[in-house]
Image: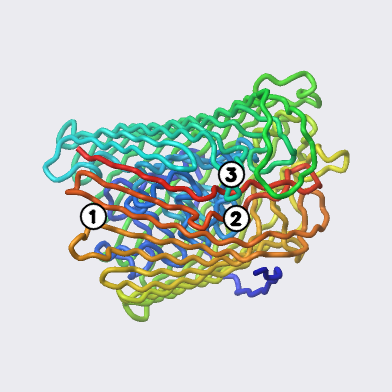
Amino acid sequence: MKTPYYSFLFSFKNALFINAFMILPFFADSLPADLPSQSQNVKLSPLITSDKAIEETSYLKVFDSQYLQNIQAQNLSETFVKDSEIQVGGGAKIAQKLYVRGLEDRMFRVRLDGIMQNGNIFHHQGNMLFDPFLVKSISIQKGFADIENGAGALAGGIDIVSKNAFDLLGKNQNYGAYFALGGQSNYGINTSLAAYARLAEKLGLLASYNFEDMPYYRAGNHQKVPSSESKAHNALFKFDFQANAHHSMNLTYHFTNLGSIAPYSANVILDSAPTLYANTLNAHNLGLSYLYDIQDFSLKYNMYYTHKSLVMNPTSETNSPATGGGGHNHNHEEAPLDLALQNLGADLIFKHSFASSRYFLKYGLNYQMILSNAYHLTDHQQDHGNTGKELGAVYGGFIAGEINLLDSLSLDIGSRYDVYSYRDKFSQQHANNGFSPYISLLYTPINDLSLRISYDYATRGAMPIDVSLLTNSHATISSNLKAENMSNTQIDADFDNGFLSLRGSAYYSLLKNFINNYTNNGVDEHNSLSKNMEKPVEVLGYEVGAGLDFTYAKIEFSLAQSFLSYDKKPITDTFELGANSGRSYNLSIHSSPFKSLPSLEILWISRFVEGIDFQGYNLYFNELENVSKKGYNTHNLYVNYQIKSRVILSLALLNLTNQTYTNQMSPLKELFAKESGIPLYEPGFNAKFKIIIKL
């Protein structure tokens, strides 16, 4: 079934804002949420309390470790399979990108244990690298992120938190270990090992390693898919020191190595037999945080450093894409790439509560520096003064307050102010600044129902561009880039009485001065210009959900669709921004069907996505073109059985109908090519089995 693209508009009057603070230039971006603090939690609504854990509201989605373990999540696509408003495009692991409400993850503020994951190293590959193996939780704030997250959260925030030793140690246990071995029919193996200990009464250490080897996967038509070969190594080291009830500190190090054999454009294929490249992605993430927390006051300090690198070299191999389309033959070797991206930053955050927690105040300072480099440039690549490196810095601060006007009515209001400094590859200086205010009103007429209306205005200044463009001296940059800004207006409703849950959200966002790094400059199609778009991008959408919680089963249903448009026309797929898809439906059933076997859990997840046809606006070439995306449906079954708390057996049957399909967030064409490309197919039927042993 296909539905035509349509849109409707609604608007709200702008709310009043309070902006009253001065900014000092140091410290930066956000602290891990895994430290024990009552003041760290976001106030969502009375529906979410310490003794009543709810997986989601209309504006926050949380994935916990038990769910991720049950579905044997190994990549982004498997992690976010359950939710209609979240999709993952790209097919293969190296190419996967997360889209929330149609917007790419680059539009969000992404943190891994408080460590910022900003920047884009190569637009044909994914930006988010993390291992679901020991993830404690993933929370996605849709619309606007916590103000303390730092600058540039245009569409919201994504916070990934890993487990520590104290999360894994049992009662009266001083050390332990965890081993998992799994395999999949389409194709590959996965093994994980973790060791954790209480080194002293208040000191915990966790060390883990995960290895995944996937020779390739096949689509539903049984053809081998390019870009699908990969090997991944992941390591995590985490020290946690809980000195007493008021002081705690942790040191975290994440390492990821992802090797893949893929075409140059790993997420879309142009050639009938593309040249393959050996890709090596490395990511180092180091973070140190400190928390001081007493009854009415808390102080958080966080500092972090990240280093990501990508090396690509052509091999002598070629491959034929597993698709049903033709594709124009552009088969030639691109130059090797040697790219690096670094983030360095710190945060200082204060929180106060007054009058028996009736009023809250938080304020703080943020600092972040981003550096990017392209190495081994040729003389031609250094034409026009191209230095092959860029540097950006953000200095900012924030102040916000929450006032409980009534027992059933609370007001949340605040703003941040940020100063951006950016030196591009041609040594041009760009200076931006701006306020990012927000206001939110939460009303809970009864204990089971909450209603919220919110408005925020986020500013993101010019910062280092896609690192791969540093190798192209013809990819020019406007001399005076303006700051991007995005306003988000949202209405949310949530109801949960323990048996029936309902949620709904309608939202409208307006993105102005979007910095398009790939605008064609009219010379030839392989040249590009980074510039602000003249007109705003509009995002309009809705999502609804319902759930029934029976004694032995929980049933959930969700429906969502978003519309991204420019100059009143829906946009075609646009790197660093987003894409349009058909309406998405998700159904899940989670059950422990046998009273005699309470540790046996069965989960069924189905997704239905309607096809969509529209005439879209191509932001690269400033022209209209016809877009047609096929609908699809997938069905997954997960079975988990725990034996005496020591052994867990997991079975996952994915894409049971062996459907050949492309996720609609996978790009339909390569960036600089006007001809149709061949998007990557998703895996066909896959049976995964894993055994987990806890010591």
Q: Nearer the viewer, residue 467 or 630?
A: 630
Q: Position of residue 624 (x, y in %)?
A: 82, 58
Q: CA distance from mark 2 to mark 1?
A: 39 Å
Disc 1 marks which residue?
295
* Residue nearer the viewer, 439 or 646: 646
* Element class at badge 1: loop
Q: Which mark is residue 103?
A: 2
What is the image's colouring? rainbow
Question: Is residue 558 in sight in this rendering?
Answer: yes
Name the element at disc 3. Answer: strand
Name the foreground residue: 569 vs 391.
569
State the image coordinates of residue 294 (x, y, percent, origin top left).
24, 51
Q: CA distance from mark 3 to mark 1?
A: 33 Å
**Disc 1 residue crowd, few under 14, some 14–19, many 20+, Cα 10 Å:** few
Residue at (33%, 32%) from the top-left corner? Answer: 237
Which residue does the image show at 70% across and 35% down from the upper left? 429
Q: Quadrant of the C terminus?
A: top left
From this view, report whether residue 23 is shown above or below residue 278. below
Q: Amino acid at mark 1?
A: Gln
Q: Are marks 2 and 1 in contact (CB under 8 Å)?
A: no
The amino acid sitting under disc 3 is Val
Closer to the chain start, of discs 2 and 1, is 2
Task: Give the number of the disc on residue 56.
Answer: none
Q: Is residue 407 visible?
A: no
Read off the residue under disc 3: 419
* Figure check: 376 above or below 572: above
* Location of residue 329 in the rendering, given as x and y in whole percent from the top left corner: 79, 38
Could you say where residue 174 lies in the image, as x and y percent from the top left? 15, 36
